[in-house]
Amino acid sequence: MNQYPGWKNALIVFFILISSLYALPNIFGSDLAVQVSSAGDNAISQSDLENIEKILDKDSVDYKSASLSNRSILIRFDSNGSQLSGKESLKNDLGRNYVVALNLAPSVPVWLADLGGKAMSLGLDLRGGVHFLLEVDMQSVLYRSIDKYEGELRTLLRADRLYKNIKKDGESIVINFKQSELKEKALKLIKSEVSDLVVVEGIGTDGLSVTLNISNSAQKEVTQGALKQNITTLRNRVNELGVAEPIIQQQGSNRIVVELPGVQDTARAKEILGAVATLEFRLVDEKNDPQTAIQSGKTPLGSKLYYFKDGRPLLLKNRVITTGENITGASSGIDQENNIPMVNITLDSPGGRAMLETTKKYLHHRMAVVFIENKVETVSVDGVKIKKRSTTKDIINAATIQGTFSNRFQITGIDSSREARNLALLLRAGSLSAPIEIIEERTIGPSLGADNIEKGILSVIAGFILVLIFMVVRYRVFGMVANVALTLNLVMIVSVLSIIQATLTLPGIAGIVLTVGMAVDANVLIFERVKEELGLNTNIQKAISAGYDKALLTIADANITTLIASLVLFSFGTGPIKGFAITLSIGIVTSMFTAIVVSRGIINIIYGDRKIKELSI
Amino acid sequence: MKLLNIPEIDFIGKRNYAIIFSLILLVVSIFSLSTQGLKFGIDFTGGTLIEVGYQDSVNLGDVRSRLNKEQFNGANVQYFGSTSEILIRLEPQNASSAKVSSKIIRLLGDDVDIRRVEFVGPKVGEELTNDGGLAMLYALMGILIYVAFRFEYRFALGSIAALIHDVLITLGIFSLFQFEFDLTVLAAILAVIGYSLNDTIVVFDRIRENFLATRHTDPNTIINGALNQTLSRTIMTSLTTLLVLLALYLLGGKIINSFALALIVGVLIGTYSSIYVASSMILALGITKEDMIPSEKEKKEIDSRP
């Protein structure tokens, strides 16, 4: 009577085999590797692989293997030294169209990888790396688009001299009119030509003034556009840094998550990610003296006062020759003549044209390079959080135009080679369309990551063994059955995590440990119930089956409530909490299968379908 | 095979002691929570935390004087685990941007191993605090609905009372001893909610079953019987869970320490409360055999089935 039908046993065996198979990739450890991927949209191809092999052979770097997977090429190494020299030679020879990054590659055998077997992906707290949460300053995006609309309105209404004046007021534009007919005419024009602006009802329409706001849909478009553009720029910058498997994604309406596994120089990563830097090229106003401008407090018409980093003042013309947006290429180097750091700049064709015209016309004048950086920072003032925005504009260099040039030239005046490198990188990767602020950072050094793995695994094993002993002592043969179920449960958790490629974190390991402790609960419930039934019932087979049946609903009720709590955790949680919730949820579901179905199957095989006098329970 | 001997402990008869015990714990917890509150970690308060390792043991005074060079006087510097590892904390007002940590690392010099840097902006901390509170409420509500649907409203109230009891006392202990309360502790408390409920449900299931299966109608006898029948299971499961938590606490490393501690406290309290608090509560709410029997209308529907 206590016998599963054949198909049910087969199903159990099938599940055990499948989960063992997909848990298997995790026992192989990992290789030191260098990962090469494309910096642009071009896919990596077989010819790239051959090229890489050639480069490594040329520089006689020892490598274990090089393989092409869907989006990248992995080169595996035996030692740390050859990994580093391999990275260096590839980086030098492949050029900037490729991202070359150090990585750890799981060494899963080919036949297993072909079956889709993958090792669990480890979170930053286990492999080391940086997690940044960046917030885009949408306010300044809106301010900037108000500037743009103000310009548009002026051009639109100027033709017929429709307005008295146009002012910006925060995120709105106020237009004053002389007559109401002109106002009506202007509003009609605005409605048809600048449909992104809407009249603010109530305060906007009375009298001779009109207040306009950016419509909700246009606001959304502008802010979403800024966010997308920032993500693209960040991706370029991260590619320039050379990081294997970075994550850059939108979170909510104005935030971006950046995760860089394995990055060690976090200070540089922070500088590069957060910088909103661009360049402007302006002519020097040679006719006026900056000192008089400072003393009188009045700058001459058409010029503005700027300062060098060391505080020297200089008057620059208001007209901008070209800006960082026209830069298509930048690389850092050393100026051979003076032995100082420099950046080589390449401009696009509009930029090159403007530069050519200017240098022709103003030969032997001075031209200045202005470095502009926008910053935003949240500070707490009397408990209220406000965003503090600041822009610094420093002249980094002002040199006499010695000859005409167009789209290729050098700039000097940069403090150090490191700064030259950073500036070149930022100019290459493009500028951020809106200032961003790092509002959260979590960095785990590689040594702590390794520690965490070791301690996590140790506590899983220790907890697991303690429970195994405890169960055998208390329930003997039944306890051993429960232990088989528990072991299988661990295997299943690992295989599910590997299959869905959920990220395993330290709290995730804690979730597994907790599951080990709680998963035996189902078996404890069943066994206690079987014992009870044995006291009431003389038929041992009936007692077993009644024990299982009666405990079933209780187990389901108890587990569903825990599942509710862990689902809440999952939906609320950020990174670390999510990791805990995932393993706990998976553990609850798999433990129901192993503790109820599998343990019953084994008990059936041991005791089922025959007369027995005693149970070892 | 031993024949089963179910203990006959008079839990219900001694429930007045339990009520007094619980009340004392609750009063102390609430008092401590309202006077000194919780010692929130930077996940909630915002601020900067840096953990660094040195080759050899290091003098805290040296580190402090290095930091003081650049006006980081507000920094709290302490050993972390050993004398070659230190933890530096900065309050949010001294660390409003992610740059602070880079500055400090530069001051510490090149020979240190940066093990961990955490910076939480003031806004993020605030959001986490709000979300954390909400998560706790959602979990309680979801469970309340499920239990009310599966059992009866008195059971739902009883289990929620037990949960609030467990959560308050766990929080109270964290407040009383000023253990650090960070994001992982919040996760642990939500897990405690799940665990404590697990225990309570098992007892409730048995109470319901006994109401329906026996001719006894005295709620005291029935509940007491159910508590005794489930006692060995309650103890077994708590023990296995505590065993693994102890392993986690002792071997899991410093980051996971307070997480394991919160669960240990929660499981202990949860075990006690599933025996005393939840069942005392349904008894006080006046549960009877009639409440367990399907109503006349439902019965007719069942009878009329073919």
Image: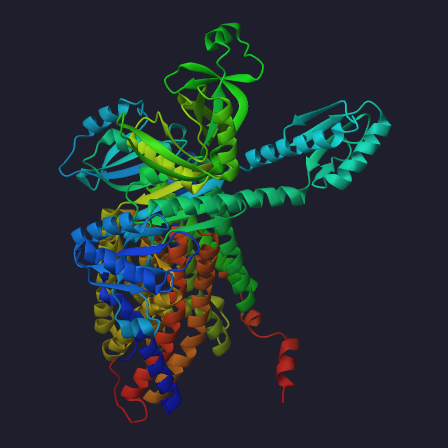
Q: Is residue A205 left or right of residue B153?
A: right
- Looking at the rendering, which quadrant does residue B222 occupy? bottom left
Front position in the image: A496 or A377: A377
Front position in the image: A251 or A553: A251
- Residue A376, position in %: x, y? 47, 31
Quadrant including the N terminus of chain A: bottom left
Q: Is residue A258 above or below residue A546?
A: above
Please tell me which residue is depicted at 18% across the width and 35% down the height of the picture. Answer: B111
Front position in the image: A407 or B228: A407
Please tell me which residue is depicted at 68% across the width and 25% down the height of the picture. Answer: A167
Q: Is residue B283 above or below residue B178?
A: below
Q: Is residue B61 left or right of residue A516?
A: left
- Looking at the rendering, which quadrant does residue B94 occupy? top left
In the image as oriented, which residue stretches furthest toward the bottom?
Answer: A610
- Residue B48, position in %: x, y? 35, 35
- Looking at the rendering, which quadrant does residue A149 occupy? top right
Image mark count: 0
Q: Is residue B120 visible?
A: no
- Residue B234, position in %: x, y? 35, 65
Front position in the image: B305 or B138: B138
Quadrant including the C terminus of chain A: bottom left
Q: Is residue A567 visible?
A: yes
- Residue A185, position in %: x, y? 83, 33
Q: Is residue A143 above or below residue A80?
A: above
In the image as oriented, which residue stretches furthest toward the right?
Answer: A181
Colour scheme of the rendered structure: rainbow
